[in-house]
Image (cartoon, grey):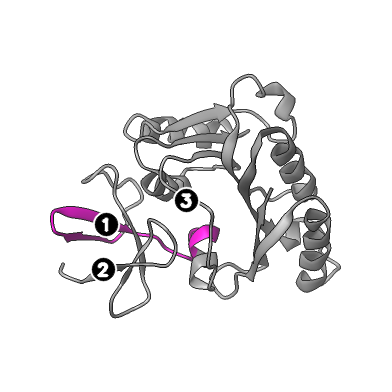
Amino acid sequence: MSQKLIPHKIFEIYQEARGRRLFTKSLIPQYNPFDERTITEHGEEYHEFDPTRSKLAASIMKGTTNAGIRKNDVVLYLGVSHGYTASHISDMIGPEGLIFGIDPAPRVIRDLVFISEHRTNIIPLLVDANHPETYIHRVCQADIVYQDIAQKNQAEIFLKNCQLFLKKGGYGLLAIKARSIDIKKSNKQIFEEIRKKVEAEMTVIDYRILEPFEHDHCMIIVKK
């Protein structure tokens, strides 16, 4: 398939010159466990980054101007699940970067172990992000804390991990799922409450509601 790609304003993200699809340059060509659409240009393989499958891609599609993620970054990923978004972040940070992928579900960590055999910059950890003291000796200081956890106390989990692991000047990305916090309040009310809570400790640099790509979600990006 031939389609000219151009660099996006977000570092290490590419987009179609005609169209809105997002891509990352594959760190592991011809390895595609998520059956993504691929484009090959100038001998490089690019995988589509689908905003209906990733809150990070959705936030970029909604106009995020700085996701904070750079080449060679260390990323603490809370709620890594099966690794779809982590695989694209793996492309973005490159072989010298590192992702600590945290999840308490054995099934998804098992899947991530298989991916990490190919993507060697991902380290799966079967631990609970509610209890960072249990992995404080297994994780180094991070340039990025990325969280996608559907729990009532998701803001507290994020702040606790940022306090312990996020470097000064580092970036935090918090995907909020409103329905996991309170089904009686409106999404907007929940998002604003969480934003104020996070803003009390760090600088909010971006805030995006992720409709229509991700329902009941917003992305808050902060700098420590």
Residue lying farthest to the front in this orientation? 169
Residue lying farthest to the right in this orientation? 184
Disc assigned to residue 46: 1
Q: Are marks 1 and 2 in contact (CB under 8 Å)?
A: yes
Does 46 lie within the magenta span?
yes
Instruction: Find the distance from the CA under tag 2 to the CA under tag 3.
Output: 20 Å
Residue lying farthest to the top in this orientation? 137
From the viewer's perspective, is 48 left or right of 198? left
User: Looking at the image, is mark 2 or mark 3 earlier in the sequence?
Assistant: 2
Element under label 2? strand
**122 lies above or below 44:** above
**5 lies above or below 56:** below
Q: What segment is highlighted magenta in the picture? A: 37-57
Which of the pair 30/73 is nearer the observer? 73
Check disc 2 and report the residue beneath it. Answer: 5
What residue is at 53 percent from the left and 36 percent from the top? 101
What residue is at 59 percent from the left and 21 percent from the top? 138
How far across and how far down the image is residue 4, in percent? 21, 71
Check disc 3 and report the residue beneath it. Answer: 85
Amino acid on which the number 1 mark rests in the picture? Tyr
Element under label 1? strand
Residue count near mark 1 (Cα–Cα under 10 Å), binned few <14, some 14–19, many ≥20: many
Amino acid on which the number 3 mark rests in the picture? Thr
Amino acid on which the number 2 mark rests in the picture? Leu
Which quadrant of the figure has residue 186? bottom right
Instruction: Find the distance from the CA under tag 1 to the CA under tag 3.
Output: 15 Å
Which quadrant of the figure has residue 191? bottom right
Residue count near mark 2 (Cα–Cα under 10 Å), binned few <14, some 14–19, many ≥20: many
